[in-house]
Amino acid sequence: MVTLEPMRWWHIDAIVPVEAQLFAPEPWSARAFWSELAQLQTRHYLVALDGTAVVGWAGLCDYPDEAFVQTMAVAPAHQRTGLGARLLAALLEEAARRGQRTVSLEVRADNEPAQRLYARHGFTRLGVRKGYYRGVDGWVMTRRA
């Protein structure tokens, strides 16, 4: 059974290789994850654990006027199991707990499965960042509660 729990520094070594597999050529580095975890007041990061194995993660930034999904990933062997939806729902719950009514994110224009997931959770496309992902456009999607 996959469980969700707060991301801690000891999870980073397990995350980085999967991050590289999923998001090459622009994966987050271990340093980027460390930096995010150090910002306790404005960040909320989760890992999905299958036993002790990290099989997914997600992070939220709490800005003054909106929350922003910083990252979300599910290891290939656990994709299409509903885990992405669980992670996203947990981030949305945290945003609501923090009083945020608006949550935004960026997604690659060619990542249709992620776009469908976000749309199912009430996100709509509000903008495009041309070439944001090394030549691939990034869609800005927002959900207002």
Image: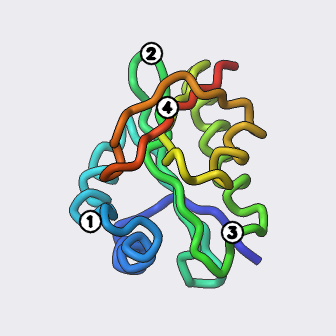
Q: Residue type at mark 2?
A: Asp
**Crowding near pointer 3: few (<14 within 10 Å), some, many (20+)?**
some
Query: What's the distance in space between the residues labelled 2 and 3, CA to CA?
Result: 30 Å
Q: Viewer-proximal residue, 129 or 37? A: 129
Question: Which of the marked residues, 2 or 1, is nearer the chain's N terminus?
Answer: 1
**Crowding near pointer 4: few (<14 within 10 Å), some, many (20+)?**
some
Query: What's the distance in space between the residues labelled 4 and 1, CA to CA?
Result: 23 Å
Tell whether 105 sits left or right of 82. Answer: left
Could you tell me if the residues under marks 4 and 1 are in contact, i.e. CB atoms within 8 Å? no
Query: What's the distance in space between the residues labelled 4 and 2, CA to CA?
Result: 16 Å
Scheme of image coloration: rainbow
Could you tell me if the residues under marks 4 and 2 are in contact, i.e. CB atoms within 8 Å? no
Q: Viewer-proximal residue, 32 or 26? A: 26
Name the residue rendered at 61%, 19% in the picture. Answer: 101
Give the residue at the far left of this rendering.
Answer: 31
Q: Which residue is mark 1?
A: 29
**Crowding near pointer 2: few (<14 within 10 Å), some, many (20+)?**
few
Dividing the picture into quadrants, the one containing residue 49 is bottom right
Q: Which residue is mark 4?
A: 140
Q: Nearer the viewer, mark 4 or mark 2?
A: 4
Tell me the quarter of the image containing the C terminus.
Answer: top right
Q: Disc number at residue 3?
A: 3
Could you say where residue 92 lies in the image, as x and y percent from the top left? 64, 37
Q: Residue type at mark 4?
A: Val
Q: Which residue is mark 2?
A: 65
Q: How many marks?
A: 4
SS assignment at label 3: strand
Query: What's the distance in space between the residues labelled 3 and 1, CA to CA?
Result: 24 Å
Query: What's the distance in space between the residues labelled 2 and 1, CA to CA?
Result: 28 Å
Tell whether 33 sits left or right of 18. Answer: left
